[in-house]
Image (cartoon, rainbow, N blue to C red):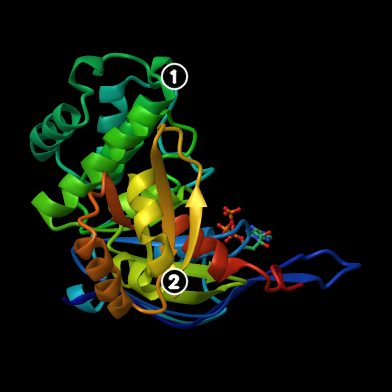
């Protein structure tokens, strides 16, 4: 997979330019990162970890103190679209179509190319019948969709999104997540997204980088992270009778009984020393012909992984 964005030794401090203080805040502190092309990359981290500053430096809106950002997949600057936190992503008083005309013009897209592009995007994002509505009369979810539509004008190759689903209800958030996945699949877009919503990251990102105090603490595919942090815990449910039969043979296993509302049933979480230890356990179950009404491996969520990675280390650097 070609590298879309390559970041080396990136530093950024914000200085307070006041005569009586020379205080500065280190926002990004030696960041190293490679983002593959054609997938959604999640930039995660607690408040103040440096995500927005990083995204703004990639967008060329904040100038780094030192280090480099390059775009090897395009041998130059890619076409870029961005929806950034706290910036003017759409004009409230303008209608949906006027916003499109305005931002299309800013991006240098000719009207005859803009019309079909915009119509297709409005259709895709379910905004086709809102063309003449002022942006301020749209729901927050629709405004957010419009902001993404505007960022997609001019057919960018790299899309930067800062908290695209913040404050949206579940269904609007799911719609935007689905649309982002469609864009990557159908148009080969590369997306870098920041979010505090781990379930969003888990659902749309293939890889994530967890930032802490201005650098990447951990970066990997979600699948590998789940494996890496995976526990060999199994959940199983059986009848009380079956449990009574096998219990004497479980003395070598660490297990706990979970709350089980179903009468006559027992739910267990069994912790295995390693994944191979499942076989003797299955042999016990088979020998006693135990019927399991539940049998699953417990996997850590991205949220649990995030908490482990970010816990217990210093947050901000003065
Ligand atoms: P959040 O999740 O809260 O949005 P973030 O990970 O996006 O946080 P940044 O917004 O990049 O973090 O901020 C990193 C650090 O830089 C913080 O300590 C912040 O206070 C500081 N900072 C960001 N922008 C500025 C600015 N314009 N002037 C001064 N300090 C800033």
Identified at 13% across, 29% down, the residue is 119
Picture coordinates of residue 2 (x, y %)?
Answer: 18, 77
CB at mark 2 closer than 8 A to ligand 1?
A: no
Q: Are marks 1 and 2 in contact (CB under 8 Å)?
A: no
Q: Earlier in the sequence, mark 1 or mark 2?
A: 1
Identified at 38% across, 40% down, the residue is 265
**Where ligand 1 lies, by quadrant?**
bottom right
Image check: 196 left or right of 132? right
CB at mark 1 closer than 8 A to ligand 1?
A: no
Image check: 294 left or right of 211? left
The residues tagged by marks 1 and 2 sit, at their Cα atoms, a distance apart of 60 Å
Identified at 36% across, 35% down, the residue is 173
* Mark 2 neighbour density, 10 Å: few (under 14) some (14–19) many (20 or more): some
Question: Of 112 and 163, which appears nearest the observer?
Answer: 163
Image check: 314 left or right of 104? right
Identified at 24% across, 67% down, the residue is 282
Name which quarter of the figure residue 50 lies in: bottom right
Picture coordinates of residue 288 (x, y %)?
Answer: 24, 59
Please say if 130 is above or below 83: above
Image check: 2 left or right of 186? right
Q: Nearer the viewer, mark 1 or mark 2?
A: 2
Q: Which residue is mark 1?
A: 136
Question: Of 273 and 43, which appears nearest the observer?
Answer: 273
For residue 253, which numbered disc appears in the image? 2
* Mark 1 neighbour density, 10 Å: few (under 14) some (14–19) many (20 or more): some
Residue 26 visible at all: yes
Q: Secondary structure at mark 2?
A: loop
Question: Of 234 and 42, which appears nearest the observer?
Answer: 234
């Amino acid at each position: 997979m070609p590298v879309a964005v390559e970041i080396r030794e990136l530093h950024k401090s914000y200085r307070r330019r006041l005569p009586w203080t020379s205080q500065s805040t280190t926002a990004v502190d030696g960041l190293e990162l490679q983002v593959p092309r054609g997938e959604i990359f999640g930039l995660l981290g607690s408040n103040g970890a440096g995500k927005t500053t990083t995204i703004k430096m990639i967008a060329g809106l904040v100038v780094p103190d030192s280090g480099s950002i390059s775009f090897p997949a395009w041998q130059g600057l890619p076409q870029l679209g961005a929806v950034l936190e706290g910036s003017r992503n759409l004009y409230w008083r303008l209608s949906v179509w006027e916003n499109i005309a305005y931002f299309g013009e800013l991006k240098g897209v000719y009207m005859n190319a803009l019309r079909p592009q915009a119509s297709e995007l409005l259709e895709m994002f379910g905004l086709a019948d809102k063309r003449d509505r002022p942006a301020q009369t749209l729901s927050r979810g629709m405004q957010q969709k419009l902001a993404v539509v505007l960022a997609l004008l001019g057919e960018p190759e790299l899309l930067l999104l800062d908290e695209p689903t913040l404050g949206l209800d579940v269904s609007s958030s799911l719609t935007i997540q689905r649309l982002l996945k469609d864009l990557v699949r159908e148009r080969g877009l590369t997306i870098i997204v920041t979010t505090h919503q781990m379930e969003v990251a888990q659902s749309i990102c293939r890889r994530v980088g967890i930032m802490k105090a201005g650098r990447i603490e951990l970066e990997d595919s979600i699948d590998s992270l789940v494996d890496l942090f995976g526990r060999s815990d199994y959940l199983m449910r059986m009848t009380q009778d079956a449990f009574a039969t096998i219990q004497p043979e479980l003395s070598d296993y660490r297990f706990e009984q979970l709350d089980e509302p179903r009468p006559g049933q027992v739910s267990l979480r069994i912790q295995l020393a390693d994944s191979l230890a499942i076989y003797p356990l299955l042999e016990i179950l088979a020998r006693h012909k135990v019927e399991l009404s539940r049998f699953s491996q417990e996997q850590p969520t991205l949220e649990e992984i995030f908490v482990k990675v970010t816990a217990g280390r210093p947050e901000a650097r003065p």
